[in-house]
Amino acid sequence: MLTRLKPLFPYLWRYRRAFLVGGISLLLTNGIWVIFPQVIRRAVDDLYHGVTREKLLTYSLLILGIALSKGIFQFLTRWVLIGISRDVEFDLRNDLFKHLESLSYEYYQRTRVGDIMARTTNDLNAVRMMLGPAIMYSANTIVFTAGSLIFMWGISHKLTLYAFVPLPAVSILIQYFGKRIHERFEKIQATFSDISARAQENFSGARVIRAYVQEKAEAENFARSNREYINRSLKLVQLMGMLWPTLQTMLGFAVVLVLWLGGREVLLGRISVGDFVAFNMYMVQLTWPIIALGWVINIYQRGTASMGRINEIILEQPAVADNDVARDLVGRETTLRGEVEFRNLSFSFPGSSKSVLRHINLKIPAGSSLAIVGPTGSGKTTLVNLIPRVYDAAHDGQVLIDGRPIKNYPLAVLRRNIGFVPQETFLFSETIRENIAFGVEHASIEAVRAAAAGASIAKDIEGLPEQYDTVVGERGITLSGGQKQRTAIARAMIRDPRILVLDDALSSVDTHTEDKILSHLREVMHGRTTILISHRVSTVRNADRIAVLHDGEIVEYGTHEQLIERNGYYTDLYNKQLLEEELARV
């Protein structure tokens, strides 16, 4: 249990001064409240011997003062301690998000988004409850019980022992229920993650679901998961429903025992009526702390289960990170020329023994252009993903920029100098202007317009009602595939990168638009290293060099004319596309 909570200690230490203030307020709250039965005790004994106006006024003012003081310090206790839990939640949520942002692409390939969302919302809230109400009520119970015990022992040793007869049984009960609450809550949270993941996938894939008329089937699947969640939650509620009444029953048994034996002690003259009243008041006052103990156990077990799930994220380490050489360069001005080299590169995905790339030797001079073609699954995208270190090559020195292994560059510097348009276009649920300017701080509207013009998307944007302030919707759903791709190209171009990578970035545009983009790209590409991946010969024919990948190996390399003369894969591709164009004209 303590191992799971260990990551929280630095956060709690950060607010140690606030905890000190809250602790003092808590001590004063319980100290004042534990004195209250003593005032009643003295009042009963004093008034038993004669009632006067002065006595009534004195004791009334004392009781009022105690109630008022207790209320003030109780407010301070709750304000400070519950406030700390909110502050820790704020810090933990920010750090968790920052850590998730640093994790490698590989982590998100094997982890569902819905599961991450559940841990950063529902689980984090359970941890906050453990750090706030659970700590406060636990401390209240311990302090008040300790204070009450001292006074109760002073009134009667015998009655105190009788009052705590159920304590061993309560301890066993707490241990028994606590373990089962923890187990059941872990299962509940796992089911909640499944529900979140299913909902997220259904909302993101709404168009596919409707296209295949699977609304009813998906609704039934969701209802099945929801029923499982409800059933597991009800089992936890049943457990909690047994815990509290059992605790109350044990406490009631102790109260009955004290009333019976305490009454005899009064009749025998061993304790006064005031002592008896005060002792019973302590018993009544202890009712809520003991009942709260059951509630605290529930919160604590939920919190530790949730913290265990959050720990799984915290313990994840980025597969791609800066090495010692790169860390020494952080903060220094580093300018890249843009020469890219793959040196005897072989690559396989983590956990797989099959090589995706084999013996790649390729050098792209700074300022030149390289086109990569090849059949689906030949490793084109994997190859360019190694440049910005989306994945890492197995050995140092296999991928170099300007003659230096890319692992020796800080990730921030490396990626700042690379404009990357991935195969799968992603736009944020923001305006078109914000999407284009995503990688540049304080980009002017002129720069945004220039990038949009370069990507041949400017006219489309200006035709929209709100132009550059048009919100594109989730994942750019309001734009066509071609418009999304051109917006992504504009986003890469506005950064003015030394290395520009276009991974099949023109697949969703027509040939006319492609020609316009390419003609402008030739100006943009001048002086910078450009890598193009495409299935169209029209896209790659003007590149300085063309590499043909097949089954993870470079099988052809040269200019467009040289590759045509070789009469290999590239020539077949060229001839097929010529035939398709001729058929399209007919």
Image: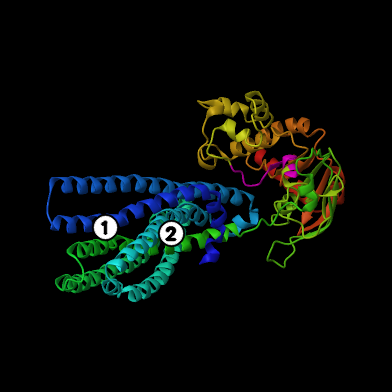
Q: What residue is disc 1 on?
A: 38
Answer above or below: position of 222 versus 558.
below
Q: Is residue 297 magenta?
A: no
Quadrant hosting residue 294: bottom left
Q: Furthest residue to the front?
A: 49
Q: What residue is disc 2 on?
A: 192
Q: Position of residue 320 (x, y in %)?
A: 70, 54
Q: Position of residue 88 (x, y in %)?
A: 50, 49
- The amino acid at mark 2 is Phe
Q: Position of residue 229 (x, y in %)?
A: 38, 62
The span shown in magenta is 413-426
Q: Nearer the viewer, residue 500 or 268?
A: 268
Q: Residue at x 39, y 52 (%)?
A: 26
Q: Residues within 10 Å of mark 1 (few under 14, many from 20)?
A: some
- Disc on res. 113: none
Q: Give the Cα distance between marks 2 and 1.
A: 50 Å
Q: Nearer the viewer, residue 507 or 458?
A: 458
